[in-house]
Image (cartoon, rainbow, N blue to C red):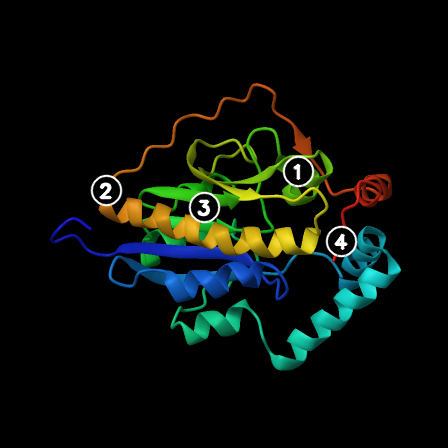
Amino acid sequence: MIEGQDKLRVLLITEDDPLYVVKFFEVFFAECPQDQVELIGITISEAFHEPIWKTARRMLGFYGPIDFVRLCFRFVGVKLRGYNIGKLAREAGVPMVETGSVNDEEYVARVRDELQPDVIVSVAAPEIFKKGILGAAKRRCINIHCGRLPIYRGMMPNFWQLLHGESVATLTVHEMAEKLDAGGIIQTREFPLREYDSLDRVIVGTKRESARLMIEVLERFAEGEVEAPPLDMTGKKYFSFPKAKDVREFRRRGHRML
C-alpha cells in the first residue's frame, strides 16, 4: 500500500448459497489482508430470485434423483447448523447492506453516497448489474468468473469446461460491463481438471482458489491503479443452464456430479 493512503474500501455483493459460494468466503474472510483492505459491507441476495420449488425442480433435473437427495441432505445439514455466508460475514465483522435488488435506485444512492466503496466485488451475484451500480464504485466494479472468457461466458462454466474436455478451468477476475461477462480482464489463474472428475470437487476447488485470486487483485488495487485490457470477443460463446442431454453426455464421459 502507498504510504499515507487509506485502506482500499470494498463492498461485496453475492448470493445466498450455503453449499458452494460459501466456500469462497471461508477462504476470503480468513485470508483477506486487513492492513490493506477494509470490507465495508456485504449484500447477500436470494439465489435465482424464484420460488424454492422451481429451484428444486431445476436441481432435480440437473443432478438426477440420487445425487439430488444427497445434495438435499447437505443443504438441510448446513441450514440446521445455521451455517451460511451471513454467519461468516458477521464473524468477520462485515456489515450487512440489505436490498431487494442491487439495481434499486435507493440502494445505488446509498452505495455511491454513503458507503463510497473504491471497489465493488461481485461473487456469483444473481442479478445483471445495470449502469447505476456499475458506476457506484470510485474505481472499479469487478467480478470473479470460473471460466475462460469470452469462450465460457454465462452459467455453470465449470460444467461446460469439464464437458468439453478442457485440461484446466480458467478463473478470471474481470471488470464488469453492461454486457454480461464482457469487461476487460484483470487477472487469471488455472485450476487443473482431471480426465474423470466430479463437478462437486471442481466447484469447491475453484471457489477456494477464486478467493485467493480475488485477494491478489485487491492487493494490487491497494498498491495502485490496475489495468483491465479490453476483452477480445473473437470466438465468444454464451452457455445457459445445462439441459438433460448435456448431463447425460457429461456422465457418459466419465464425470460425476457429486
Residue assigned mark 4: 257
Q: CA distance from mark 1 to mark 2?
A: 34 Å
What is the count of numbered marks?
4
Residue assigned mark 3: 133
Q: Please name whichever residue, 78 or 128, is drawn nearer the observer in this view of the structure.
A: 78
**Residues under numbered marks 2 and 3 in contact, where contact means CB atoms less than 8 Å apart:** no
Residue assigned mark 1: 161
**Residues under numbered marks 4 and 2 in contact, where contact means CB atoms less than 8 Å apart:** no
Furthest residue toward bottom = 81
Residue assigned mark 2: 224
- For marks 3 and 1 on the same chain, the one whose residue lies earlier in the sequence: 3
Residue at x 69% of width, y 51% of height = 199
What numbered label is drawn on residue 223? none
* Local secondary structure at mark 3: helix
* Local secondary structure at mark 4: loop
- The x, y position of residue 155, in whole percent, is 66, 42
* Local secondary structure at mark 2: loop
Camera-near label (4 vs 3) is: 4
Type of amino acid at the residue the image marks with label 2: Gly
> Would residue 4 appear left or right of 173 to someone viewing this image?
left
